[in-house]
Image (spheres, rainbow, N blue to C red):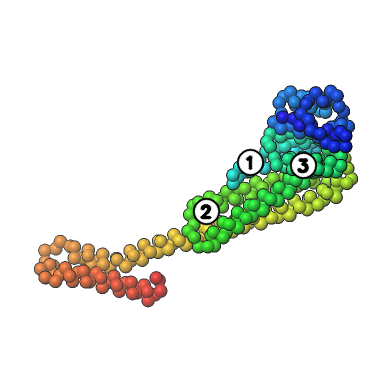
Amino acid sequence: MITIYLKQYNKIIRNADTDLFDELGFDDILWIDLLEPTIKEQKAVENFMELSLQTKQQVEEIEATAKYSETENAIISNSNFFVPQGESFTVEPVSFIISNEGVLVSMRQAEFRTFREAEKRLQMNYRSYSTGYHILISLLEVRIDYDADLVEMVGKQVAAVSKEISSGSKIDKEVLYRINALQENTMLLRENIFDRQRVLSSILRSERFPNDIYPRLQLMIKDVNSLISHADFSFQRLDYIQDAALGLINIEQNEIVKIFSVAAVIFMPATLVASMYGMNFKFMPELQWEYGYLWAIALMLIVSGLTFWFFKFKKWL
């Protein structure tokens, strides 16, 4: 699907007709958004822009030159965007190309809340988005705000797990699975924010953006740095929670082992007595004694009680 944002009659008009490329020029078009584009749509954009769009392999590369580069005809930037799926995330790369005439081309394979919000801002205050450079910065600003929401959400989930462990409730493997999932989400989130930092730093070093953009870039980089610090704190807190959970599990297991060990030791003298009277010797003093059975039972109870008292006296119980 293709969406073309036109500058006409002092307002922004959305259109999805690729035939407009034959009638309009760079001064009429502000932004071309490609969502899961067909080959025909890609070819139409490439012919109009007189450049080649990024392939999926190029967009997914992690080298610094793949994230941001400048050519004689355009500025190319690739960035990763999150798509929430339940309690986890998937990463979808997005490609941005800005021509020398200031036309922005975005190409993506998934729908993002960021683009819907940026479109709303464009429609509400179109005078602030005179070029594709301004739209790209607006998209990144909205994305950083969304990243902040994700960092806050993960922080709340970490706090909930911490509260659950501190409440003294039983800790099972499900809690460890949740901690591991939060660790994975936090690492993905941090990598995603770090990717944003690289793109913003590259734009800040560029001399081809309008001058009114650079003060906004500096504020955005500060926000990104604070988000990275917050994500690092959440990850460190998860490490602490995981260590605490494993420690509590070990204590619980040690208590169980202690109970079995004490029980085995308490009944060991009784077992010894039972073993002695269970010997099949012909001449045993108590064998013909009418109180021999009661004597053996009483003796086992006495030695078990003495053993229990000894443990209590030593404060091992």
Residue 284 drawn at (x, y percent): 13, 67
Label 1 – label 2 distance at C-alpha: 22 Å
Q: Is residue 307 visible?
A: yes
Kindly identify the amino acid type of the residue bearing the numbered disc 3.
Answer: Lys
Q: Secondary structure at mark 2?
A: helix
Q: Please name which of the two marks, 2 or 3, marks the residue nearer to the observer.
A: 3
Label 1 Cα crowd, 10 Å radius (few <14 / some 14-19 / many 20+): few
Give the Cα separation between the discs numbered 2 and 3.
Answer: 40 Å
Query: For the C terminus, which image quadrant?
Result: bottom left
> What is the secondary structure assignment of the residue under circle 3?
helix
- N-term mark: 3 or 1: 1
Residue 120's disc is 3
Distance (Cα) linking label 3 and label 1: 25 Å
Residue type (three-letter) at the residue carrying disc 1: Thr
Instruction: Name the residue carrying label 1.
Output: 90
Q: Is residue 161 above or below residue 277?
A: above
Q: Residue at x 78, y 26 (%)?
A: 17
Residue at the (83%, 46%) spot, across then down: 204
Of mark 2 and mark 3, the one earlier in the sequence is 3
Q: Mark 2 Cα within 10 Å, few/some/many (few <14, many 20+)?
A: some
Q: Is residue 205 visible?
A: no
Percent from the top left, x then y, of residue 241? 57, 58
Residue underneath mark 2: 175
Judging depth in this view, the residue of 91 and 58 nearest the camera is: 91
